Image (cartoon, coloured by chain):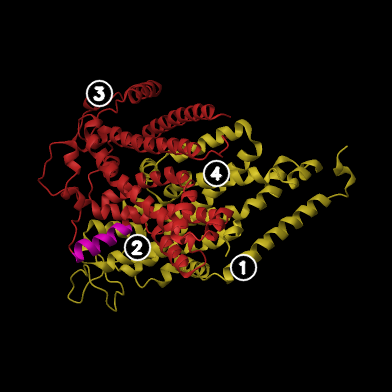
Chain colours: A yellow, B red
Amino acid sequence: MSVKKHLPANVESKLTSSRVFSQIKDGVSTAYELYRSDRLGQFGIVVLAAFVFIAIFAPIIAPYSPGARHRRDDGSLARLDAPSTDHLLGTTHHGQDVLSQLLVSARVSVFVGFLAAFIAVFIGTNVGLISAYYGGWVDDILMRIVDIAYGLPFLPFVIVLVFIFGANIVNIMLVIAAILWRDSARVVRSEVLSQKQRPYVESARAIGASDFRILYRHVFPNVLPLTVLYMAFAVAYAIMYEASIAFLGFGDPNVYSWGRMMYQAYTHGAIRDAWWWVLPAGVCIMLLVSSVFFIGRTLEEITNPEIRH
Amino acid sequence: MSLKKYVVRRIGQLIVTYWAFLTLLFVVFRLAPGDPTSMYLQEGLSAEEREAILARHGLDQPLHIQYVEYMTQYLTGDLGQSFRHGVPVWDVLVVRFFNTIILMGLAFAIAYLIGVTVGAFIGWVRGTRKEKTGIVVTLIARSSPEFWIGILLLMVFTFYLGWFPSGGIRPPGTEYETFLGRYLNWGVAYHLVLPVLTGVIYYMATPTLLMRSSMINVLNSDFIQIKKAEGIPEYIILYKHAARNSILPMTTVVALVVGMSIGGSLVIETVFSWPGMGREMVESVTYNDYPLAQAIFFLMGSLVIWMNFVADLAYVYLDPRVRYD
């Protein structure tokens, strides 16, 4: 006879749901405390929020349509005009407004960054959980797959796949996620290996909780901070890889992105004189990615209390 | 498990990884759109001529025969013929391979050296302004993709100051007889500065941050307190005792950074027109030259797989406390 029979109905589920809730509440309040005292983390959140805002409202904020070709007063194409009051960041080789392109491009980076990272961490966390929890041959097979994913040089692999499946933004996102999952898989696995030994897992099993329930109701909340941290890293890498792919000329030709702006500026030799075409996109990539890393650094203090000052 | 058993097991894993890698390579490249003939199609190629070209490259066979053929070829070191250059892939790659190894090897080595030194230092000055500045600078370097750093360096040092050449590997028109002579000269060194610097700035971040956290762990141990009590000068404790004990985890990210720098060679070589594997890969993918792209992918993957293997063995050799699991 199992212990469960002696418990009033749904006590177990009440217990765990309040436990999960309080765990998450604890996590959020710890995060709040840490961010309150950490300037870098605050800076990261503000910058990230600004970029998300720009990404959502880009078509409204942008002064012109990013593809529109502008003409000077004398009717000639406004080719590589230096910044002026009409074009705050000057124009491109094709007479397009740099600022408008810059603002609209934020969409791709934010979209690809978050979605690719979410997919990657979703796969990685599940692989890590299952691999560590079941062990044995399941673990062996999954970890060999992770090893193989680590043996693939990232950028060449992504370029070949993007070339095969077609250069559109969804494919680029999926391909990036198809490699990025490996990091979170490894880290979550080693964390679950240690969580598995804790008494709460044994108690849950003793009451007769199913594997699925133990994994997702009991173990998962304990690796959640780690998952969030690796999500932040994945966002940063996804943004940089998307930009690199576009810079190499394999990006989606139908959307504006910072990498594509740099690609066009570079292939037109604009780095010799037209700094206004080259610098803004690079600065934006750097700002957005570093904001995510700064947020991640503060999150790291939650997952690893030893490095708190 | 004994060390010997661990090594045997690790070799077994290496073989399985290699097999899976080769198979994946085959699958990926057979999925690719177009074939060598699609490049010539606009020139009006008749159906028979197309068949003939496919047959010459063995592409008219059923897939499983192509797979066996491909495996035997790669295992015997035959990487096939380049569609675009019309010569064996090895002939195209042999020079480019070494060009890439020189560039990325140097960037990797310097990045590690600086990373370990700087990481040890900012771990040591933990909690001060210096540490914070160090971390911010490192994180910003890590947030800058290689092409962005490369373009910035080009803008400043080439187009504004005019100190360094804008690209290439040696002054045009120079030829060298011997292998070493090709690289050991001032012309190459002069062309190497900016691309290597680009790599160093970007790859430095990972070892720096890891070294810092490893240092923090070691600095909490008793023997550091004892050394301090003995009155030994701080910089000696820092670099002789603390740093040496913190260096071990650095082997675990060697393969990771090698993978990053191998992939990064595509970008750095494109920015600086460096005639290496990375740039060749970008071009061969654009021109549908599968055998070449496949071979470069194979070489790059092999480097990462082998570095993983060596790093794992080095780790158990260097750390006697490690459990073999």
How far across and down, in percent of the image, does residue A19 sit?
75, 56
Q: Residue at (60%, 58%) from the top-left corner?
A: A306
As for residue A213 lying within the magenta part, the answer is: no
- Residue A307 visible within the image: yes
Amino acid of disc 4:
Arg
How far across and down, in percent of the image, does residue A166 sit?
38, 44
Q: Residue at (29%, 44%) from the top-left corner?
A: B278
The answer to whether the residues at label 2 and label 4 have Cβ atoms under 8 Å apart is no
Q: Which residues are magenta?
A: B148-161
The numbered disc on residue A282 is 2
The numbered disc on residue A186 is 4
Q: Nearer the viewer, residue A259 or B45?
A: A259
In the picture of the structure, the residue carrying the numbered disc 3 is B56
Local crowd size for mark 1, using a 10 Å CA cut-off: few (<14), some (14–19), many (≥20): few
Q: Earlier in the sequence, mark 2 or mark 4?
A: 4
* Residue A288 to residue B101: above or below: below
Q: Is residue A183 left or right of residue B310?
A: right
Callout in the foreground (2, 1): 1
Spatial separation of the CA atoms under disc 3 and disc 4? 44 Å
